[in-house]
Amino acid sequence: MSNETKIGILTVVAIALSVWGFKFIQGKNLLTSSNFYYVEYTHIDGLATSSPVSINGYPVGIVSNLTLQTDKQNSILVELDINNGVNIPKNAVAKIVSIGLLGGKGIVLEFPNPCQGTDCAPSGSLIKGRVAGMFESMIGKELDVNTYVEDFKGTAKSLVDSLLSPDKQIGKSLGDLEVILNNLKRTTFKLDKLMDNSSGQLSGILSNANSISNNLKNSNAEINNIIKNASDFTNQLKTTDLNTTLTKANGAIDEATNAISGLKSTVSSASTTMENADAALNEMKALITKLNSSDGTLGKLIEDDGLYIELNKTLQSIDKLANDLKDHPYRYVPLKSKRKVEKYDKQLDEK
């Protein structure tokens, strides 16, 4: 036998062993014959190929294939590979149950009585299917659900009583929580009352806020114009030659400084003038005081009516004398000149 033939035989044997081992790991022994049954489910809750099939906990086969039937409202057709020699009655039910805490699924075959002969379903038959609920999968059919619930209630009650005991930290925490809730209830009641009393003020505040927002909305165009003007001003300021402007401003500041210096000199001169004027006013005040006093001549003239009267008489006499001198001047000239005066008066009268 050639080496090529030996290598070919070893390759075929290796492939066959690999296929057999893969199927064996899946739970199917290719060296033994088996029967196939089919079950339809509306949902399978995580059932997968190679999931175990058992009767009363004893494994009798595996799930060999899953097919989605789109023409039958997406129902699932499950193919069961059952070991040869296991008889399945026609009224058997293939129930999907949970087989572990991690959520694994399997199928349990249930039937009331074993079958013989024609009462057994032949290979390729369609049997009924059902999906068990969570509690049914956990407690099994040998226990009453009500009994299980009562036991659970008793255990839960004792656990809750133990946790809520005042001696336990949880009980103390719940007591504190009750006090906090009562305080919160009173606080919310006071807050509700305060809100009721302040509802009018809140309404006014909201109305004022609404009015302000409406005014802002109505003044939106003016605000936009103000912003635009400010933007234009900043642009103009940006394009302005600031160095030239600062130079001119410095010159103006220097001129203002000089003007202030001149103003200070003027103020100093004005201060001196005011001092001189003040001194003159003081002297005039003293003079007026002396005039008002009756010690001086002018004071006596002002205060004494008799002097005024005598002075007035004197002035009247002087006036009479002047009139008489005008009318009769010859009375006040020597005798030698009287004739000349009379002659002169006569000439005047003729004219």
Image (tube, rainbow, N blue to C red):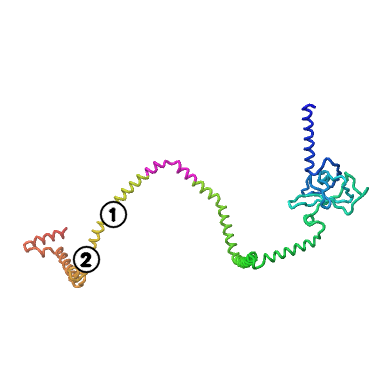
Which residue is identified by label 2?
286
Q: Amino acid at mark 1?
A: Val
Question: Which residue of the protein is positioned furthest toward the front in this rendering?
Answer: 1
| Crowd tier of the residue under label 1, counting other residues whose Cα lies within 10 Å: few below 14, some 14–19, many 20 or above | few
Residue 106 as seen in the image, left or right of residue 230: right
Task: Label 2: state its secondary structure.
Answer: helix
Residue 65 visible to the viewer:
no
Question: Which residue of the protein is positioned furthest toward the right in this rendering?
Answer: 118
Which residue is identified by label 1?
267
Q: Residue visible at 25% across and 61% down?
A: 278
Q: Is residue 175 magenta?
A: no
Residue 312 as seen in the image, left or right of residue 82: left
**Front of the two marks 2 and 1:** 1
Q: Which residues are magenta?
A: 231-248
Q: Amino acid at mark 2?
A: Ala
Q: Is 262 in front, or is 284?
A: 262
Q: Which is nearer the N-term, disc 2 or disc 1? A: 1
Residue 110 spot, x, y in % from top left: 85, 52
Residue 41 as seen in the image, left or right of residue 320: right
The quarter holding residue 287 reads bottom left
Assign the N terminus to one quadrant of the image. top right
The quarter holding residue 146 reads bottom right
Residue 33 spot, x, y in % from top left: 86, 42
- Total marks in image: 2
Residue 104 spot, x, y in % from top left: 76, 50
- Residue 288 tag number: none
Task: Label 1: state its secondary structure.
Answer: helix
**Of helix, strand and loop, which mostly describes the magenta segment?**
helix
